[in-house]
Amino acid sequence: MYPFNLTRGTMIPDIERQYLTPGIFFNQKRILDDLQEKYSRSLQDNELLRTKLQQFTPAVVVVEEVTPKVAKEKIIEYLKNNPGSYTSQIAYDLRLPIKAVLKAISSLKKVGKIE
């Protein structure tokens, strides 16, 4: 666990022991090199995190109020060009309120215009 330091009669923690040379002196260059490496890795990790967070930045989407009939027409046209799209993507791309899209899709499924 802790090696005994014969010159001082004290225990040396493992964290300090890794930086000791056989002469029981701290190797400052090794310490500084390790700290520099950890710092540069930390900067790289921060940059990766910043990039990922920018992808999740919320966007403000202005929706337009349309009649249910117009919403259904837009959705049918959209699904012709983008089959299998998610409801949220339809609402985002067409700038329609999500509730209007959900109601329109439900209605279109009932009458058999979409699957």
Image (tube, helix red, strand yellow):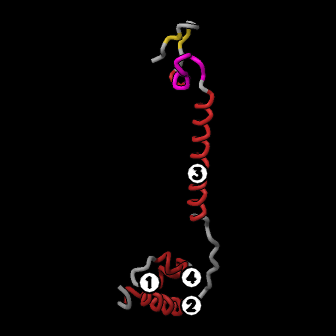
Magenta highlight: main SS: loop
Mark 4: give few (<14), some (14-19) or many (20+) Cα within 10 Å: many
Badge 2 element? loop
Image quarter hosting the C terminus: bottom left
Q: Residue at left 53%, top 82%?
A: 100
* Residue that numbered label 1 is attached to: 105
Q: CA distance from mark 3 to mark 1?
A: 45 Å
Mark 4 is on which residue type? Leu
Q: CA distance from mark 2 to mark 3?
A: 50 Å
Q: As shown in the figure, which amino acid type bears the numbered disc 2?
A: Thr
Q: Are marks 4 and 2 in contact (CB under 8 Å)?
A: no
- Which label's residue is closer to the chain start, 3 or 1? 3
Mark earlier in primary sequence (4, 3)? 3
According to the image, label 4 marks what residue?
Answer: 96
Label 4 SS: loop
* Residues in magenta, as a range: 16-26
Frontmost residue, 14 versus 112: 14
Q: Is residue 41 above or below residue 26?
A: below
- Mark 4 or 2: in front is 4
Mark linked to residue 65: none
